[in-house]
């Protein structure tokens, strides 16, 4: 309750099927529990987004930074 930011790497498993409730589709999980107003951002970058959070330099970002400096 005190966290300013939570990074959630998606639910695990096959959330869409009640027999396996507990994982799978992040949007389905958000809708099922009615927390749409509590989620501020959803990345579609997958593992690349996690690498950016780790501080890794990604080739695409380096190219964008190079062109922005021109």
Image (cartoon, grey):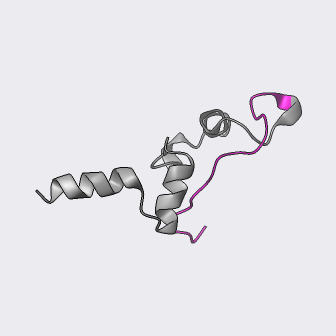
For residue 16: magenta? yes
Residue lying at 79% horizontally and 40% vertically, measured from the top left: 13
The mark tally for this picture is 0
Q: Is residue 38 above or below residue 15?
A: below
Q: Is residue 50 above or below residue 33?
A: below
Q: Residue furthest top?
A: 17
Q: Nearer the viewer, residue 21 or 45?
A: 45
Q: Nearer the viewer, residue 35 or 28?
A: 28
Residue 17, position as x, y percentages in the image = 81, 27
Q: Is residue 17 left or right of residue 44?
A: right
Residue lying at 10% horizontally and 56% vertically, measured from the top left: 70
Residue 15, position as x, y percentages in the image = 76, 35
Residue 60, position as x, y percentages in the image = 36, 50
Q: Which residues are magenta?
A: 1-18
Image quarter of residue 30: top right
Residue lying at 22% horizontally and 57% vertically, measured from the top left: 66
Residue 65, position as x, y percentages in the image = 25, 58
Image quarter of residue 16: top right
Residue lying at 52% horizontally and 59% vertically, measured from the top left: 51
Q: Is residue 36 left or right of residue 9?
A: left
Q: Is residue 11 above or below residue 15?
A: below
Q: Nearer the viewer, residue 57 or 20?
A: 57
Q: Residue furthest right?
A: 19
Main secondary-structure element of the magenta-colored stretch: loop
Is the N terminus in the top left, top right, bottom left or bottom right quadrant? bottom right
Q: Residue furthest left?
A: 70
């Amino acid at each position: 309750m005190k966290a300013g930011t939570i990074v959630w790497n998606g639910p695990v498993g096959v959330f869409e099927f009640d027999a396996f409730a507990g994982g799978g589709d992040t949007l389905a999980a958000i809708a099922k529990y009615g927390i749409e107003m509590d989620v501020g951002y959803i990345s579609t970058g997958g593992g690349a987004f996690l690498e950016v959070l780790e501080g890794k330099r990604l080739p695409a970002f380096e190219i964008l930074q190079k062109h922005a400096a021109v």
